[in-house]
Amino acid sequence: LIGFEESFNSFPAIPAHVSAFGRMHLWELMQTVGIENYFYCDTDSLIINSRGLRKLENQLDNFTLGGLKIEESMTRLSIRGLKDYTTASKTVIKGIRKNAVEIRSGVYQQEQWPSFKGLLRSGDVGVYIVKKITKVLNREYTKGTVNQDGSIEPLHLTESVEIPVQLF
């Protein structure tokens, strides 16, 4: 990036390692339960069936920070896409606030609060305007092909592409 340098006390290798470690741990859990026993995974969670849970029972720990714990048990789950699902007790939709109002299927109205940067850009930091916005969800899945049974066939690169790398 032009005009950007790492700040004096910054050390990005630490958060990069922590993130990579977390991803690999999640991958190992997915391998342990088996592909037929998990339905969904996100940054820090895995939704599995009872057979998968039995395979992880010896790893459950409700008391240790970062320990593997059961957050919710459910008999129904609707997965619409990435960060877009409903269980018996909650609905998660990325970009939609919990207090948003659903106007019709896939269309929500919610408040939008200005960021600090947005306030500075407006030129008048003394005025704080909360807008009401309407969000229309596009629930098209683009990370793979959705099969008839709901499983996902990942995308595959079929040709080699050379990408020029510029070293500084």
Image (spheres, grey):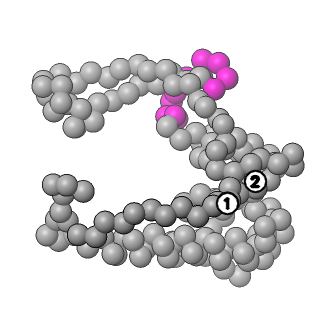
Q: Position of residue 112 (x, y in %)?
A: 38, 27
Residue 158's label in the rendered image is: 1
Position above or below: 140 against 162: above
- The residue positioned 78% from the left and 77% from the top of the image is 55
Q: Secondary structure at mark 2?
A: strand
- The residue positioned 49% from the left and 64% from the top of the image is 162
Q: Position of residue 7 (x, y in %)?
A: 16, 65
Could you give the CA–CA distance between mark 1 and mark 2, rounded to whole angstroms? 18 Å
Q: Position of residue 127 (x, y in %)?
A: 17, 22
* Identity, as a three-letter code, of the amino acid under mark 1: Thr
Residue 152's label in the rendered image is: 2
For this view, does 143 lie left or right of residue 135? right
Quadrant (top left, top right, bottom left, bottom right) of the C terminus: bottom left
Q: Secondary structure at mark 1?
A: loop
- Which of the 4 quarters of the picture holds residue 35? bottom right
Q: Which segment did they paint magenta?
A: 96-106
Can the viewer see residue 95 in this picture?
Answer: yes
